Amino acid sequence: MSRTGRLELGFLTFVADGGSGSAGAALRDGLSLVRHAEDLGFDSAWVRVRHHEPFLSSPMTFFAAASQVTSRIALGTGVIPMRYEDPLRLAEDAATVDLLSGGRLELGLSNGIPPLAAALDPIHGTSERGFAGEAQHRIEVLRRAVSGAPIAQAAAPYMGVPEGGDLVVTPHAPGLSDRLWYGAGSERTAVRTGEQGLDLQVSTLNTEETGEPFDVVQARQIRSYRRAFAEAGHADRRAARTSAGRIVLPFLDRQDADDHQVFIEGYSSGMTSDGRPKDPSPFPVRFSPVLSGAPEGIVEELLADEAVRETDGLVIVLPAEGSLEVHRRVLSAVAEHVAPHLGWTPVG
């Protein structure tokens, strides 16, 4: 099934704290970029969540601020690694942000990457469920919490709740439970996402290697997800939603090429022309290419991208580093010269 309706357009930023300014300046630049995207008519703004790195680590506090300086654009995480999250605290924060924003939060989740995230085991402890099992357990607790379902019983009378009475997470944000996403990297995890009734994110890497082109593998993941979503009966209640991330850097002049040269060379130097890492990887992985150059060439590549043709939304993944002005220019060029040729129309 290929998309027939309007393409939704989003962008993803790392909110990098790696420039010459302060950490506070980086956060304010991030807010400015979200406002700029809303002015351009983007549907959604997504943030990468990284711990112990010079990038955004507290998305809910960032979105609480973003909700007060924007009025329409959806605010999403891509993605929160759940292995080490407290699902009840996250449910409280997410519901608070959703209410502050008027129902605009899109909560993207993942297990996390075991070889990297397991470095936190000495702090948080290990689990008899294993890495993925513990992460999935916490996702399930989060899902129950944001849906308003009881998460415990009072051991004694508490704030009007009798002993044995149900305890629920507050505040409750109606509709948030239908805006939970999972960032899948393989067909197996895409199928599980559909069975769970979550929405699906695929991004700039796959964690399975079939020998096929990157977009072909992701298109199959999207189709398998939709089939599993429908077979589990979720389609009777609402439509499945999918998004695909791509690094898109249009060059309108020589300055654009100069601005992105270091990133493009650094990104491509670590992999083969088809996205395989040159150095040994602890898990199967394939990366998507950078789509750069003249806008018309980028349009042709995206129109030929099998996964982009299948998905409901395209998310423009910005380089991790880069000035506010450079990133604003990327979003403007995409909105003016690329996305309208793919089936997108600006909101508002």
Image (cartoon, rainbow, N blue to C red):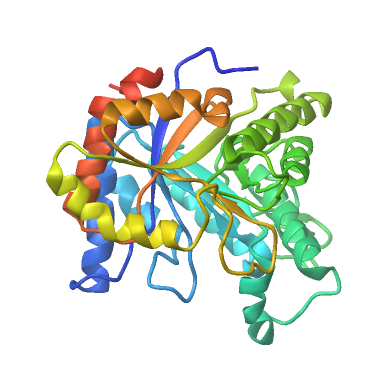
Q: How many marks?
A: 0
Identify the image quadrant of the C terminus. top left
Can the viewer see residue 95 in this picture?
yes
- Residue 261 horizontal side relative to residue 96, left or right: left
Q: Nearer the viewer, residue 120 or 254?
A: 254
- Residue 178 horizontal side relative to residue 257, left or right: right
Q: Position of residue 42 (x, y in %)?
A: 33, 32
Q: Position of residue 38 (x, y in %)?
A: 28, 35
Q: Residue at x 56, y 48 (%)?
A: 108
Outermost residue toward the front in this view: 273
Can the viewer see residue 344 in this picture?
no
Outermost residue toward the bottom in this view: 122
Residue 282: quadrant of the picture: bottom right
Q: Nearer the viewer, residue 273 or 29?
A: 273
Q: Residue at x 23, y 70 (%)?
A: 19
- Residue 250 horizontal side relative to residue 252, left or right: right
Q: Nearer the viewer, residue 147 or 181?
A: 181
As drawn, 308 above or below 198: above
As drawn, 15 above or below 146: below
Q: Residue at x 56, y 58 (%)?
A: 80
Q: Position of residue 156 (x, y in %)?
A: 79, 69
Outermost residue toward the top in this view: 4
Q: Residue at x 18, y 73 (%)?
A: 20
Q: Position of residue 112 (x, y in %)?
A: 64, 62
Identify the image quadrant of the N terminus. top right
- Residue 135 horizontal side relative to residue 32, left or right: right
Q: Nearer the viewer, residue 103 or 311?
A: 311
As drawn, 309 above or below 330: above
